Image (cartoon, rainbow, N blue to C red):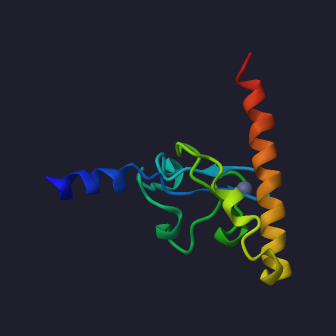
């Protein structure tokens, strides 16, 4: 019984979505990519290496992890701040900064949903 409850909890954890830095397309694992016949539920890491952005044809390396969009708590990124920031490489710092920009962009886009 307790094992079953544990599995359900894990299943509820949403995998990360990835955003294309070139065009802003967001790959959501819960939706997959019908154009490339990627089944819903396929996490980004399991996409074939030859997979390209369906909008602008960018490679997988052009995508950044923006976290789980539908997770109950969307502020997991904040945990990263203040946690060993001084030992981060410049590339990692850029990732943090860009992640903040992406979050801001998502909030901005969400404003349109209010109308
Ligand atoms: Zn793209």
> Where is residue 33 shown, x and y percent of the image?
52, 51
Q: Camera-side residue: 16 or 63?
A: 16
- The image shows a total of numbered marks equal to 0
Q: Quadrant of the C terminus?
A: top right
Q: Is residue 104 above or below residue 64?
A: above
> Where is residue 61 shown, x and y percent of the image?
69, 72
Residue at horizontal 39%, vertical 48%?
A: 12
Q: Is residue 75 above or below residue 109?
A: below
> Where is residue 38 shown, x and y percent of the image?
45, 56
Tell me: 32 left or right of 21.
left
Residue 99, quarter of picture: bottom right
* Residue at the extreme top of the image, as rendered: 115
> Where is residue 17 shown, x and y percent of the image?
59, 54
Residue 76, quarter of picture: bottom right
Q: Is residue 62 above or below residue 72?
A: below
Tell me: 68 left or right of 115.
left
Residue at horizontal 74%, vertical 77%?
A: 84
Residue at horizontal 49%, vertical 56%?
A: 15
Which quadrant does ligand 1 occupy?
A: bottom right
């Amino acid at each position: 019984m307790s094992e079953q409850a544990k599995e359900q909890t894990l299943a509820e954890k949403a995998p990360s979505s990835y955003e294309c830095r070139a065009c802003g397309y967001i790959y959501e694992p819960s939706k997959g990519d019908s154009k490339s016949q990627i089944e819903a539920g396929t996490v980004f890491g399991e996409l074939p290496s030859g997979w390209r952005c369906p909008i602008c044809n960018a490679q997988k390396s052009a995508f950044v992890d923006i976290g789980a969009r539908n997770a109950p708590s969307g502020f997991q990124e904040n945990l990263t701040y203040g946690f060993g920031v001084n030992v981060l490489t410049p590339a990692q710092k850029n990732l943090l900064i860009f992640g903040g920009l992406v979050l801001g962009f998502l909030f901005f886009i969400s404003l349109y949903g209010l109308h």
